[in-house]
Amino acid sequence: LFAVKQIRPAPMQRVSKVVKHDSPEELERKEVLRKMFVEQARRYLGVPYRPGVKAEPGQAVGPGAEIEGLYLDCCGLIRRCVADLKEMFGFELAPFNQGYQFDTLPTKLAEQQLRPGDLVFVEGVYQGDKKRPPHNIVHVEVWIGGASGEATIGARSRFGVIEQ
């Protein structure tokens, strides 16, 4: 998974980094994982949104959220999809917010570099007394591209469900 960091540019800094080039087999494995991740996110379309909650691992889901009591927020959707595929990914995400997810991803991409399965982070400022989130990251969604080239899957509070 990769990230788009939608924050203000920082001053340029010199950084030394060893770049690992993946073998053709590893590139193919990653492409399969991307497709599986997007399809897993699609399984949650229609699940109701509720901030600060997550589905339990192993809890059955399906289109339209027929399962009573299943709710996900934006971070919960990402965590749940990764947990569902933990055998393939080889890890799970800790139960923290989108700022944590932003910090754990290895690569910043420009919008034109996005591929299905990448994560898109949204920067914003909460109104009122809400605590400022890390990096001002207030939302995360799964990039799928689609016909418009801009489609995502995400848990959106204004619509009340996970939607594409």
Image: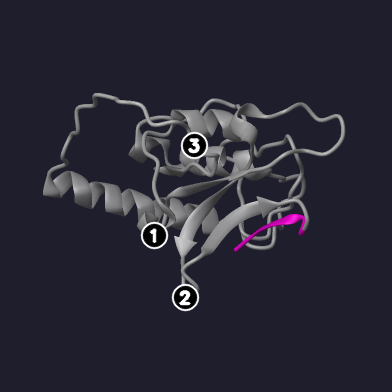
Marks 2 and 3, how far apart at CA: 29 Å
Marks 2 and 1, how far apart at CA: 14 Å
For the residue marked with disc 3, what is the amino acid? Ala
Residue found at x 76% / y 59% = 159
Q: Position of residue 96 (x, y in %)?
A: 60, 27
**Of the image marks 2 and 3, the number of the one nearer the N terminus:** 3
In the picture of the structure, the residue carrying the numbered disc 2 is 147
Dot 3 alpha-carbon crowd within 10 angstroms: few under 14, some 14 to 19, many 20 or more? many
Q: Is residue 93 magenta?
A: no
Residue found at x 55% / y 40% = 7
**Eyeballing the image, is 89 above or below 119?**
above
**Of the image marks 2 and 1, the number of the one nearer the N terminus:** 1
Disc 2 secondary structure class: loop
Q: Is residue 162 magenta?
A: yes
Magenta segment: 159-164
In the picture of the structure, the residue carrying the numbered disc 1 is 112
Image side of residue 74 versus residue 146, left or right: right
Image side of residue 116 versus residue 122, left or right: left
How is colour applied across the structure in the image?
one colour
Dot 2 alpha-carbon crowd within 10 angstroms: few under 14, some 14 to 19, many 20 or more? few
**Eyeballing the image, is 58 above or below 104?**
below
Residue found at x 72% / y 36% = 53
Location of the N terminus (image quadrant): top left
Mark drawn on residue 83: 3
Q: Position of residue 130 (x, y in %)?
A: 81, 30
